[in-house]
Structure formats: C-alpha cells, structure tokens
Image (cartoon, helix red, strand yellow):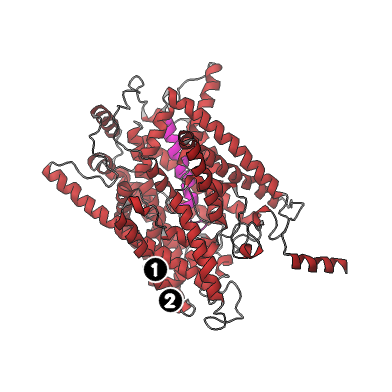
Amino acid sequence: MERIENQQEHRKRNNVEEIETISTERIFDTKAAPQWKKQLTFRAFMVSFVLSVLLSFIVMKLNLTTGIIPSLNVSAGLLGFFFVKTWTKLLQKSGLLKQDFTRQENTVIQTCVVASSGIAFSGGFGSYLFAMSEGIAKQSTEANKEQNIKNPSLGWMIGFLFLVSFIGLFSVVPLRKIMIIDFKLVYPSGTATAHLINSFHTPQGAKLAKKQVKALGKFFSFSFLSAFFQWFFTAGDNCGFSNFPTFGIKAFEKRFYFDFSATYVGVGMICPYIINISLLVGAILSWGIMWPLIETKKGHWYPEDLSSASLHGLQGYKIFISIAMILGDGLYNFVKVLSRTLFGLFQQLYGNKTGDLPITGRSAPTNQPVPYDHHRRTQLFLKDQIPTWVAIGGYGTIAVISIITLPNIFHQLRWYHVLVIYIFAPTLAFCNAYGCGLTDWSMASTYGKLAIFTIGAWARTSNGGVLAGLAACGVMMNIVSTASDLMQDFKTGYLTLTSPRSMFVSQVIGTAMGCAISPCVFWLFYKAFPDFGVPGSEYPAPYALVYRNMAILGVEGFSTLPKHCLQLCYTFFAAAILVNSIRDAVGKKWAKYIPLPMAMALPFYLGGYFAIDMCVGSFILFVWRKVNKDKAEAFGPAVASGLICGEGIWTLPSSILALAGVQPPICMKFLTRKTNARVDNLLGS
C-alpha cells in the first residue's frame, strides 16, 4: 500500500513557512503556557479516542480499497477544536468550567489522533500484514505453503503492534534539540499544523473555524446519507451505483467509470492536481493501451487456459510492472532524500564551524526569524527535557522484549533477524526523520520494502522467507514511520509552545490507542465481508497481493515472471527513474505538468474508476477556485473532509448490518441490450 505522501504535497501547496514577519507569540503574550501535566487533560484524551475511532475507519477503508490516504491532520485539528470548544462552552454556562481550552491542548489532541489513526496505515492491514493471510496466498501460485501463511487473529495482531510501534519513538527522542533548535529543520507538515492550531485560538481564527466545521458537518451528512441510500441497491455481486457504466459497457469492462464514491471525490479535492492527473494517465496507459495489447498475446506469451488470478498470465504483468514502477520511484526518492540528508548534515556541521547560518532544506526561507518568537519558543522547548536515559532505556527494553517475543509470533523470523533490524533501525530512523525535515517526504514504505528483500533473501523459501520478509517489513516500517511522525509533532509543539513531554506522552498514548483500535476495526471488516480481499470485491486490499509478490520476488528471484515480463519490468523501472529525474531537472515551473510515476503505478492493477472520482474532485475545486479563490482555499479542506468522513463512517453501520446478516433489499445491475434480451428469453421460457 502506498500513501504517495499526499499530506506532504498538500502542505507544500499551502505555502506555510516557519519564519513569520509578525510575531505570533506576542498575540498570545497575555496567556501563559500551562504546565506540561495540565496540557494532558481527560477531555483531550476522551475526544482523541472518539476521533481516533472515526479516522481509523476512514483510513482503513482507504487502505483496503485503493491505498491512497490523504492528510487528515486538518480534520483532526478542526474537529478537536470544535468538540472541546463545545464541551468548554457548555461547562462555562453551567459554571463548572475549571480549565480553559488552550492551543497546547489542541496540539495534544491532534498529535494523539494522528498517532492513533496512523497505525491503521503503518500497521500494514492493507499491505504486509494482510499479505500473510491464506486468502492472499491463494491468489498466488508460488510460496503458498503453510510455512509462508499466517492468518489474521486479533490477539497476535495487537501484540505485534504493541511490540513494534513504540520503539521508533525512543530512537529519535535524544535528537529533538539537534533537529528542531540546532539544525532548524522546517518540517512543513508540522509547521502547517502549528499555524492552523495557532490561528484557531485567535478571535478571528475561531470564527472561521466555526464556519469550517459547519461546512464539514453539512457535507458529512450528505456523504453519509448518500452512502446509506446506495447501500439499498447492492444486494448481490456487481450491483449498485458503484457499478454504473458511466462511459458505456466496454469502458466499464476496462474499469473506466464513475462509481459515485464521495470518499474519493473528497480525496481528489485534497490531493494536488498532478497526483490525480497522474492516476488517470496511468489508468489510460495500462487498461486503455497495454493490457488490451498483452491480451492479444494470449497463447504466445502465456497459456490460454490460465485462471484470471494466475501470476503466469495477464495478472502477472499487471502486478509485477506495477511493482517495478513503485520500486523505481522508491529507489530514486530514497537516493535523493538520503543524498540531501547527507549534504544537509555536511552543511549543518560546516556552517556551525564557520558561524554561517545552516541551510535547512529547500523550503527554508531567507528572512531571519522574529527574535521574540524564536527566544520564547526555544526557552519553552528546552524547559521540559525528556531524560536521555529514558530514551536509551526504553529502546533497549523494547528491543530485548521484541527479540525474544517476535520469533514466537512469527516462527520464520529468527531472533538474529530482529537483532540486525534493531541495530540498523536508529540510523535509518534518523535518516528518515532528518530527510522528512528537509523535504517533508517520509520514506517509511521504502525502508519496509528494503527489509522485505534483505530478510526474505536471508531466510529463503524453505525457511518461510516470504513470511519472514513481510514481518521484517512491519518491524522496519513502524520504526521509521513513528520516528518521523514524532519529530513532525515536536516541530508542531515547538511552534505552539507545547511541552515536549506532553507531546511525547500524547504520542505514546495515541500509539497505544491505535495498537488496540486499528486491529479491532480491521477485524470488523475482516469478519463482516465474506469476500474480503478478493479482487473485484468491495474491499479487495490490492496492495496485500503486491506486497506478498514483492516478498516472493525477493525470495525466489525472477523465476515467477511470465514471458517478456522481466524486460517490461526493467523498462518501467528505468522509466520511473527517468521521469523523476526529468521532473527534478526542469524545475517547479514545468514539473507540475509531468506525471508522478508512483501515482501512475497505482491504477495498473486497480483500474481507473477511483482516478475518475478523484479527477471529479479536482475539477470541482478548480471551478470553485475560479469562482471564488479565497472561499475555496478556506473551505475546500473542510468540504473534502466532510465527504471523506461521512462515507467513511458509514462503513461502521454497514459492517454491523453485515455481521447481523441484514442484506440490502435490491440489486441494481446494468446489462448490455443483447445480454438483457437473453435474460428476458430465459425468464420467458
């Protein structure tokens, strides 16, 4: 499953900078920052829990359908502000209010919610974790013996996540001063979130926030009711509005249609235009041109009598060419971010020696910071220190427990595999956190794929290498992902005068919530839908098969590929690197017209239906900006969040109805005229 880092692209287009021309802290000068313990309130964690459940359902649904996950930070901050502000107003009227709602408390809520719902992504429920299951293994003819299969179970999933999700937090805690104060890394996502929260707690910002929440609520209701209405027409396979042949039956068979998904219209409104266009270009290139051409080679390139799911047939080309593009894009960005990290470190150290201002990345402004803001924030950030022995002791303790325990959960993963991962993990976590501060680009999934290939090849097939590689992916991905997320949150805390201690505690509590909530949400989906994970079903979990085949490729090599597939993989791998190189070479002015290879790769396996939904979202936002740009910028994210949240939360009652055996009453299906005539004749006879 690929995130495509939509949150980073979204933050970049907000043009938010750390350096301000007007002092923010003077606005809040009359309000003293509360002590770190008072920032951690009961109401904050109550609201965080409710929002974590809501956003976990949304992220899980996106995980299990297409794997494209937009930034939900705005929704978390906005909804957190609304709920607690409403709570405090009610208490104030009744005379029971004991503590005002502060921006520090708002930051704690946002941190907790994002940490919790983030586990729904890094937990691998749509990728490496579900790829271990028997259902996904059956879709592949290789490495599907018992030693390479582990079916989901609530107990081991929760235990696994608790073992691997916290260690990344401890790995970078000692570096917080170096990253934020000394190196002055920008962390655009953390900076943008901080400015959002700061604005909410000014009189003018609070007034706008109320209007944004009203817009979010309106479109939340519309999206939820629309999903509820569509449910009545889905009593069977390929039934309902989601199978409406918008552009005709032939186009529908090639997966080109609008499926009336409010979720992906909303996602399209949040994602930059280039991502949505890239998805559409990828869909046209694959389903419109390549797959029809390869189908004509049936009987020459691959046998005619293969099942549609066989990796030795057309399915193999779809999956492995997509993997080649993903790996090419990932490798290019990994090298780019790593080189910038090393170059940035050199400049930081060289700048410190010569007394020059360190270079903080391509997003660094040229102006000097407001002295009062810088002094005030640095003073508060350094006040509540997290002892280094806590970080080292926490990392060592969790590492020892994991080395002993993980091989009992995954017998194919040996203790020395885990030890090697934990030896290299702090360095990789630092690289990811530092690179994220420079470029706002987290390479967590790329580090996970690196673990798949290295540990899988080390373990080999006979020793359950596929399962070992997938488990190693989970360990590595969780470590580097939580490390960069924590440093982003430290940046947010720095800019909102939130104590590092309260931020760390909030992150730990949010992570703990996510380790329990996300597996339960996944389990509800898993039990409610009998065809869960099956291609073409409501929740196909497409990247589970992609990740499993990456593991097979790492263990068995290229022997699994059909004829000429390897040459095509080489071509698209090189093309991904070439396109990225051209994008970087031509500069921002022209790069926005060149498609992103990672986004192009997603429809190769899934088809173009969700790309069309997202392009509709882009078109709505484009027209809105032409009509009223200021209003579109202010309310676009709120409207998009409402569309995403409404249909996303409908999955909870629909899952409960499915578990209770309640079926929709109507099947609305679309047939060609000839097929309809045959059905009429059959019924007439």
Is 354 positioned to the left or the right of 541 in the image?
left
At a point 30% along the width and 60% down the height, the residue shown is 335
Residue that label 2 marks? 566
Q: Amino acid at mark 1?
A: Phe
Q: Nearer the viewer, residue 59 or 53?
A: 59
Which residue of the protein is positioned furthest toward the left in this rendering?
354
Mark number for residue 573? Answer: 1
Q: Is residue 497 above or below residue 564?
A: above
Q: Secondary structure at mark 2?
A: helix
How many discs mark residues in the rendered view? 2
- Name the spot of residue 134 as percent of width and height, x first: 57, 67
- Name the spot of residue 497 as percent of width and height, x first: 34, 30
Q: Secondary structure at mark 1?
A: helix
* Residues at marks 2 and 1, CA–CA distance in whole angstroms: 10 Å
Q: Is residue 491 above or below residue 145?
A: above
Label 1: few (<14), some (14–19) or many (≥20) C-alpha neighbours in 10 Å: many
